[in-house]
Image (cartoon, rainbow, N blue to C red):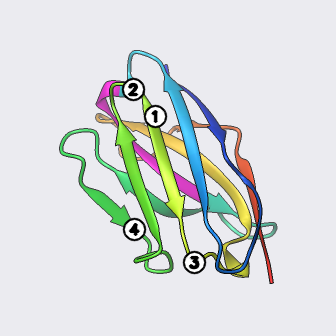
Amino acid sequence: QVQLVESGGGLVQTGGSLRLSCAGSGDMLSRSSMGWFRQTPGKEREVVATISWSDGSTYYADFVKGRFLISRDNARNNVALLMNSLKPEDTAVYYCAARYYTRSEYHFWGQGTQVTVSS
């Protein structure tokens, strides 16, 4: 099992930055890819960025490329999302997630942290 706890959300002005952090625990974490997803009311949850457990390769959704940076500290079981040049449309609840290497979908989820970007 994996437990995930997000922190770092809050209110920021357009153009500002926030750093989200996800503290993970559990013996499956070392072989789990990690990701950040977000959701707004009435919309489906969407992937923001992911980082592989094996080689650290990353994926970014087009709408955050060049603005967000995902990183992982395996020694501390932590994954972070640095968000720069924030826009009002980035306002959402952001979730940390993990996917064990034998699974095709993310199946461990944190409780979410609210990010609000004011215009």
What residue is pinned by disc 3? 85
Q: Which amino acid, by three-letter code, is at mark 2?
A: Leu
Mark 1 is surrounded, within 10 Å at the Cα level, by few (under 14), some (14 to 19) or many (20 or more) other residues, namely some
Identified at 64% across, 80% down, the residue is 15
- Residue located at (42% from left, 62% from top): 69
Pointer 4 residue: 60
**Which element type, helix, strand or loop, lies under badge 1?**
strand
**Up/down of 71 relative to 61, above or below:** above
User: 22 or 98, which lies in front?
Assistant: 22
Q: Residue type at mark 4: give it.
A: Tyr
Q: Is mark 2 on a helix, strand or loop?
A: helix
Q: Name the residue under label 1.
A: 78
Q: Which of marks 2 and 1 is nearer the N terminus?
A: 2
For label 4, count other residues whose C-alpha is less than 10 Å away and answer few (under 14), some (14-19) or many (20+). some
Q: Is residue 7 magenta?
A: no
Residue at which label 2 appears: 29
In which quadrant is the C terminus drawn? bottom right
Q: Earlier in the sequence, mark 2 or mark 3?
A: 2
Q: Is mark 4 on a helix, strand or loop?
A: strand
Q: Which image quarter: residue 21?
A: top right
Q: Farthest residue toward the left?
A: 55
Give residue 22's quadrant in the image: top right
Residue 42 placement (x, y as % from top left): 80, 70
Disc 3 marks a residue whose amino acid type is Ser
